[in-house]
Amino acid sequence: MAENFTNHSSWWLQCIKCRKEVVNASDVRLAQVGSDGGLHLALRPELEPWVDSVIKKRQHPKPHRRKEAPFKMYCLNAGCPQDLGVYQLLEDRFFYVFSFKSVRFGSRSGDVAKIKRWKESKAELERMGVQVLQVKALWQKILKKAADGTAAPNNAKEMIYFDNARTSDEQVNKLVLDTPREYQKELFRKAMGGNAIVYLPTGSGKTLVSSMVINAMLKLNPGKMAAFLVHRIPLVYQQSQYLRKQNPKLRVEILAGDLTRFPGDKQHWVQVIESIAKKRIDVLVITAQIFYNFLSDDDATLKLSDVSCMVFDEAHNCKGNHVYAKIMREFYDQLSDRYKPLVLGLTASPAGASTIEETREQLTTLLTTLRARCIMPTLSNDLALHWNNPVTSYKSKPLSSIQENLESILVNYIQSICPKIEQLSAMPEALSKTPASSINFKGCLRTVIDRCHSKEEYVQGLALVMHAMNMYSIVELNRVLGPSHAYEALDGVFQAVDNVRVDGDFSTTGNISCSQAVRILEISYGHVNKTPPPISTQLPSRFTELLKIVRDFVDHVQKDNTCRAIIFVHMRRTCLKLREELNKDPMIKEKLKPLACVGHGNGLDGMQWKGEQEVVITRLTFSNTTRMVMHKLC
């Protein structure tokens, strides 16, 4: 340890793999930085000149990430491959940021702090000597400056609503550039009558209806703005482009992602926030978390009373602790009725469960949370002419006996830890009603994950349900690409379990024993050390059929170079592996150049919108090089 580093605390930040001490707890600080309100554990800036004495730096392995995170930090211990975090751009400078997945806090006496996420462990970290800072993010400073400087007087006007059921078609048609269909005009008139959720099939024009409502509400309430809320960054760009196209005269702006992540971002944020303060924006397309942060800030110049229409894209997410639901509970419900904006939800799947009763309960909860009613076309009959109705065909391929055996073991294993997950998450019957072999089981796991996030009392439940999600992903991998890939993935999953083992007990994963992992592998292959046959010699039937379909598609491309293909899978792990395997076929690689597109997630396998997802979609849509994309279903 370099002499410049302190020794004020009995707690040390350690590599989670080899337990080597990295820095003292007093050498790091925890602060909330960034537009997303995230908490980051970073090295104190005054110690950065001596950082090479405690960590190794290597260039970030993903080129697209190097603008925001040029280096990754690694353990100094010889032979230890563990990465500890990244040298990352946050707000307007770089920090050495440690990952909660890669380090732990241990004491000289041998005690280990049970910390899973920084956000849930602020009090514990402070007790161990970590300095916890309350930092105003750069966007908050911009808001404060706008409020103190050139902001327009914030005298909220009462809302004006109008039930325009008798509005002529000619007037309605002028609200957007494209001519609305009859069912869209019907839904527009219904939506203007009060809070509503537009329920239409995918691709049938829900956003056009919202564009009509936004324009009408802005005309009725000059001086106010419309907020179009999305839950994923790519949707900010997609929906804003569409709104600009349909309403060229409206001033549409966007806010998404972290400040200064890419060149020009900071200046864009400054301009947009100043425009909000001066009331020079008509429509703001924004990720819901940032919108929530704005409303929560004491110095915010953006208030819900300044909004005439609030659109929730993919409105079915408005439940539980989702930020959509928090916006409704904490701000909309608390606002006087005279200032409440019109609420419009958009969804193609408002509710869905394994029973009619549960589906009805989900729908009732959604409508109650959004204070809305569900609207569908009932007077017009042209919807059937316009919704997507592709020609479909199905091919069923059985699993091999080895695949069936491995799936049975995996499913039984996942099912066996479900009671423990339900206990640790305080969610009885959240998982036990749905078989782990069901495609709906992922949704059940996701519900538990959402419940456990940001709650310190459910840290162990979160750890165990994330482990179950990893195991569930191997079920699909086994079905699509066969047991060899599943074997490899299993080894990685239980290696991760070993990394958090404490004193012979998995304190954060609910007493999962290594013997169970070994048993899974032994039953599948006869012996844990046996090397599985190469995948090329034992292609599973599903992958064999997929190869045939893809090779046939190559012939279509040679006849018509406008052809494109998307292969949808359920899990990210399968998506990335499938791309890798298809690229092993020389003809497919040359003619189709398959790429993968997955969500941002956690870790190195995630993809951001800028520079990654955006590039893949652009190459598929406009380029004559990439003609096939593996895509994870969201």
Image (cartoon, helix red, strand yellow):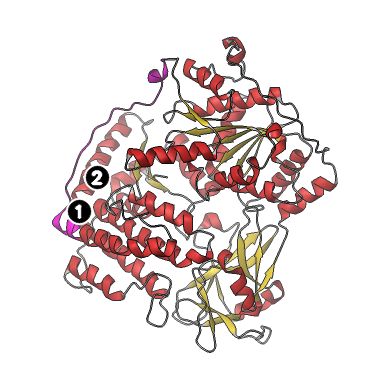
The spot of residue 173 in percent (x, y) is 58, 15
Q: Is residue 79 above or below residue 189?
A: below
Magenta portion: prevailing SS class: loop
Residue closest to the far left: 401
Point out the image quarter for the N terminus. Answer: bottom right
Q: Is residue 569 left or right of residue 608?
A: left
Which amino acid type is marked by label 2? Leu
- Residue 215 is drawn in which quadrant? top right
- Label 1 Cα neighbours within 10 Å, binned few <14 / some 14-19 / many ≥20: some
Question: What span is in magenta?
Answer: 381-405
Question: Visible in this render: residue 346?
Answer: yes
Which amino acid type is marked by label 1? Leu
Residue at left offset 53%, top offset 42%: 234
Residue at left offset 65%, top offset 50%: 293
Q: Is residue 24 above or below residue 278?
A: below
Residue at left offset 38%, top offset 60%: 422
Mark before the other along the chain sequence, 1 or 2: 1
Q: Secondary structure at mark 1?
A: loop
Q: Which mark is residue 547?
A: 2
Q: Is residue 65 above or below residue 54?
A: above
Q: Is residue 297 left or right of residue 442?
A: right
The spot of residue 583 in percent (x, y) is 33, 50
462 falls in the magenta region: no
Q: Is residue 72 left or right of residue 540?
A: right
Q: Secondary structure at mark 2?
A: helix
393 falls in the magenta region: yes
**Residue under numbered circle 1:** 539
- Residue 283 is drawn in which quadrant? top right
Question: Visible in this render: residue 314?
Answer: no
Depth check, front residue: 101 or 288:
288
Check contact, mark 1 vs mark 2: CB within 8 A. yes
- Residue 354 is drawn in which quadrant? top left
